[in-house]
Amino acid sequence: MSAADGRVLRFLVPALPVARVAWLRVVLGAFALVDALFITNHVFEHVHVGAFWRPTLVGRVLHWPPPTTLTASLALAAMVLGLVLTVPRRTRYLAGWLSSLGYLSWVLWSMGFGYVAHDHMAIVVGMVVLLTAGRADFDDQHPSRAAGWALRCVQVATVMTYTGSAVSKCVRSGTPWDWANGAVTVWAVTRRGSTLGDWVGRFPAFLVAVQWTVLVCEFLAPVALWLRGKKLYVAVGAAMLFHLSTYLTLGIHFLPTVVCWAAFLPLERLGARRRRVTRAAQQPVPESV
Amino acid sequence: MSTTAPGDLSPRSVAWRVAALGAGVAVLLGGQLADTNDWFPLGSLSQYATPRPADGSVVSTSLEGTTVDGRTVPVPLSPAAVGLSRAELEGQGQRIIADPALLGDIARSRAALHPGADRLRQLRLVRSEQQMRDARLVGPTEVRVLATWTAS
């Protein structure tokens, strides 16, 4: 294996602290519940329109049945239990499976009636790949490539949400510039405007500049995979500001993608800090290292 | 942190992970080219990807009902009201036009979700279109009934 091959492998399957997987499972598992209760809570209403059940490819391959009040409640219960069972060390691995299976069932139902929400790609990928990382404890700072690969997949899915949508714009328009020079923002604020959106809509030339910026940034999103330290935080911050602005102008929050940016952050330090505090409390003698 | 020497995975475990990641990205990009939602979660990411000409039109779909006592009522198009969202209904518009009996399912879903609401004798799928000039709405709204279901 050449040195270059080794570098590529270390990039695609990096060794990252196991604790980051443990924390990301909690972040995504908690968000999954928020999603089911407040964003895709239409699953309980979909129960009444079984005739419109049109599952996507994965649902058809699995012969997935339409939701019933019972099965939807079971999926929700699995997500709740998945979060609760994260607390005892012994049940942590099982907890990950409950969260993932509950949530994956839920999104198949949510997206199986003729509309697919494009902000769910990264979190759904995350709920699948986190299953491959095995058991993960919050205080386990050991680098693991199984953990690293799962985290890398969430990172790639997150940035590819932007790049993929930029590719889609080019495919739909035929050329990249037709979309950027068009009136898509004006059209969007007309359909689902807000006070801020209506005001912004009065500056079409400014909006064309915004559209160009959005398109270029979407294509460049994978650069975040190579950023470290402060530059990475700036990139994550920029993504947060972008989503905040589309929320304020169009009411589009994109939260399922937003939470996946957590995979870029050193979540493992949350556990390390708590452990240091506990240790300091237990032994007042300062550590020599 | 990615400066590990031995790692904890066998070459085979590394190989399938690299292959899976590559395949996932390839399918996702393929999903954009094929422009399909069917490959969820790796399908199209086309939200707001369609360019909108400033002199085009804004089209929206809605539901309109006639109650058993003959009053015409708008039927809100939301999961809370009828079990489906506007986007879902628009996604299955052709099916409803081909088989208007599906509107009966929506009427029954509405009745199940809102037992106190007036029963419907008829439910219609309506398309309204408004022209834009220089990205401003102009002219009257053109309304067309696409499909009608009548209670038997």
Image (cartoon, helix red, strand yellow):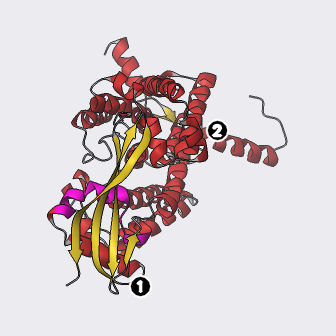
SS label for mark 1? loop
Q: Extreme top residue here?
A: A3
Q: How many marks?
A: 2
Residue A172 shows up from this direction: yes
Labels 2, 1: one chain: no
Give the amino acid type for the residue marked by disc 1 in the picture: Pro
Question: Residue A221's spot in the image, x, y percent?
Answer: 46, 27
The residue indicated by pointer 2 is: A269
Camera-near label (2 vs 1) is 1
Quadrant in which the C terminus of chain A appears: top right
Residue B118 on the magenta segment: no
Q: Position of residue A274 (x, y in %)?
A: 70, 46
Residue toward you, A285 or A17: A17
In this rendering, would A59 be left or right of B133?
A: left
In percent of width and height, residue A2 lies at 33, 12
- Indicate the chain on which mark 1 is placed: B
Q: Is residue A196 left or right of residue A28?
A: right
Amino acid at the residue labelled 2: Arg
- How far apart are the alpha carbons under marks 2 and 1? 52 Å
- How dense is the environment of label 2, judged by Cα within 10 Å: few (below 14), some, or many (20 and up)? some
- Provide the residue span drawn in magenta: B81-97
Q: Which mark is residue B152?
A: none
**SS at mark 2?**
helix
Q: Residue furthest left?
A: B98
Residue A111 appears in the figure: no
Q: Which residue is labeled 1 in the image?
A: B115
Q: Considering depth in this image, is B123 or A256 the residue closer to the camera?
A: B123
Give the prevailing secondary structure in the magenta stretch.
helix
